[in-house]
Amino acid sequence: MINLDDRAKAVRLSYPLTMRLAKLIERGAYTATAQEIIHRAEQQNISVDDAYLQMNAELDQQEANYKATTQQALEAYDIHISNHADELAQLHKQLSEARSIATTVSNQIKNAKNARDGIYWELRRADLSNEQIKAVIEMKAPFDFDKAEQEVYQAKRITMPQLQARIDDIYSEAKAVQLNVIVGI
């Protein structure tokens, strides 16, 4: 059985073939479409013009069906997104919070390093030894760089990608539902 991806691919691939066929028809080539017009005229004992009008009416119907199907597909997409609206809102909120944490903690790391460096150079100018400088810096409110960097890593490399992946999955599922309606699986 042909799957959804193959049907969608077949639709995409039919376009260049149809365009090539249209060019052949423009040049006067006798094609399957011309054969169908003649076949209908002979089978139904009608004129070639009437057979053409029949086929044209069928195309009009196909266009109307496609328009309706496209509308149904858009509605199916919207319904899927609507069904996941609360989850999407929560995921976007969590993603925003994770970004905020990563930015805030990154800024804290930067500020702590700048403060530490400022104290170091201030004490250096006061002619303190390295041991004395180290002791003074350690007495200041300690900043746990390892913990802060781990927090940034957790947010940027684990939490944010997981949240974004789930958001992407929901939209991919909605797109699959939409394609399912269009290609009729």
Image: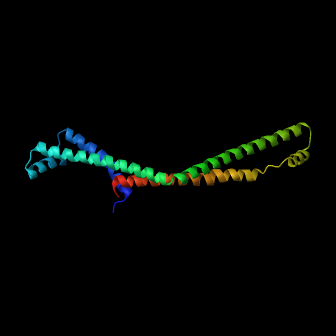
Residue 152: horizontal and vertical position, in percent? 68, 50
Residue 159: horizontal and vertical position, in percent? 62, 54
Residue 98: horizontal and vertical position, in percent? 64, 49
Q: Is residue 90 left or right of 176 when viewed as pictured? A: right
Residue that extends furthest to the left in the rendered view of this protein: 45
Residue drawn at x 57%, y 49% is 92
Residue that extends furthest to the top in the rendered view of this protein: 125
The vertical placement of 128 against 185, above or below, is above
State the colouring used for the structure image.
Answer: rainbow
Residue drawn at x 38%, y 53% is 179
User: The N terminus appears in which quarter of the rendering?
Assistant: bottom left
Q: Is residue 108 left or right of 55 when viewed as pictured? A: right
Residue drawn at x 43%, y 51% is 77
User: The C terminus appears in which quarter of the rendering?
Assistant: bottom left
Evaluate whether residue 17 shows in this view: no
Evaluate whether residue 53 shows in this view: yes
Residue 29: horizontal and vertical position, in percent? 17, 42
> Is residue 178 or residue 106 the one in the foreground?
178
Residue 57, located in which quarter of the rendered image?
top left
- Report how many numbered discs are placed on residues in the image: 0
Residue drawn at x 7%, y 50% is 45
